[in-house]
Amino acid sequence: MFSFEEKLEKYAELAVRVGSNLQKGQYLFVDVTVENAQLAQLIAKKGYEAGAKQVFVNYEDDVITRLHYDNAPLEEFDHFPEWQKVEKEWLAEHGGAFIKIKSSSPDLLKGVDAEKIAAFQKAAGQGLAKYRQASQANKVSWTVMAAPSEDWAKKMFCHLPTEQQVPALWDAIFQATRADLEDPVAAWEKHDETLSKKVKELNDLRFEKLHYTAPGTDLVIELPDAHIWSGGGSKNVNGFDFMANIPTEEVFTAPLKGGVDGYVSSTKPLSYSGNIIDDFKITFEKGRIVDVEAAEGETVLKNLIATDEGSHYLGEVALVPHQSPISDSGLLYYNTLFDENASNHLAIGSAYTFCVENGTSMSQDELAVAGLNQSMTHVDFMVGSGEMNIDGVKEDGTVVPVFRNGNWAF
């Protein structure tokens, strides 16, 4: 049994050694909330031990963020700070590695003017477009992890006394990320091998399309001719491994932009931009979203889809068995980093360029010809359950069961 301090240090080591896989002589940029300064300090310590030239830490404050949305005029949300754009682009151009620690309350911006949220999301998408293209092409090493905030912990563990909520969320995070094990780094190396085997099986099958069926879902997703399944670790442009998400249980690829038809229903709430979107159904025709219904957060969802032309299409199709560690925990995190790794999911917006052969060296026009969607946004939403079946259809019409009752059929 390890102490909290020991597990936190293991977690920081995962962020540096497995997540970003920081190399000697690199810059490291860390996004974190003020509530988790202790974790930021440990990540910086591990970063310098790994040979970082300099560790930059950007502290965010949910209270100040909410004050800004409540009090700043609408026109202040129409532009993205130039200095933040230049900072990310400069670090990417100079081989920096990036660690994002997500902590914000799922309800941070509940009740905020939806126009402000939509305006800022669009401005941020435009301002960070160059950095996003670099990260989605694996030209930089990056990872997304999480740490508790009081509000997030309260939402997840409202049944516990207040003083037990944050510790309970830490325990859940440590377990989901394997940071509570004797050697988390070795555990992640083994997990990466397991995901890689499933990736190889899917790439060998060369499906033309996938057919999803479940209560509230009947969806066909065509795949690009040269699609590539991925999962677990990635390699950056210099050939170094990194783990973009910790935790991760998924294997994924890109859909053909114009090849999605039918309808799909959500199976878990989506926490997006400080709001919860829940119980929603999306209908597609020839790839494009043509109808949306949501019991909660419908305006926020519609504004997300209206971000740009590409946000009317899908950019990712990801497979996660219903019987997997996060799903088996029975916890609903209200945080996509965790909830997407308990469920099959799709993503509205841009596709990862490494999901087609030679995609990382293609121009934007060439990627479009290859069938990949491009957008200023990329937002995952959960659609899987223990009632979902998925069939893979080959070019000759052969049908191969991929999922049965929410789990792998091969």
Image: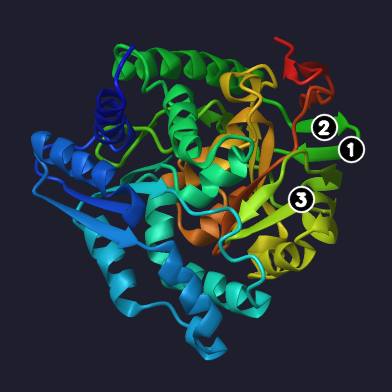
Question: How many neighbours does mark 1 have within 10 angstroms: few (below 14), some (14-19), or many (20 or more)?
Answer: some
Q: Is residue 47 above or below residue 136?
A: above
In contact (CB < 8 Å): disc 1 and disc 3: no
**Residue drawn 28% across and 71% down?**
86
Q: Residue at x 59, y 66 (%)?
A: 109
Please tell me how crowded label 3 is: few (under 14), some (14-19), or many (20+) other residues with Cα within 10 Å: many
* 170 horizontally vs 109: left or right: left
Q: Are marks 2 and 1 in contact (CB under 8 Å)?
A: yes
Q: Quadrant of the C terminus?
A: top right
Residue 278 numbered tag: 3
Query: Which x, y percent locates residue 198?
Result: 56, 16
Quarter of the picture holding the N terminus: top left
Q: Indicate which disc, 3 or 2, sits on the residue closer to the N terminus.
A: 2
Question: In the rendered structure, which disc, 2 or 1, sits on the residue that comes first in sequence?
Answer: 2
Horizontal relation, residue 49 to residue 118: left or right: left
Residue type for callout 1: Asp
Q: CA distance from mark 1 to mark 3?
A: 19 Å
How many callouts does the rendering have?
3
For the point 67% across and 75% down, the residue is: 114
Q: Residue 17 location, x and y as percent?
A: 25, 30
Dot in front, 1 or 3 = 3
Mark 2–mark 1 distance (CA, rounded to whole Å): 6 Å
| SS for dot 3 | strand
Q: Is residue 22 left or right of residue 127?
A: left
Residue 218 is labelled as 1
Disc assigned to residue 212: 2
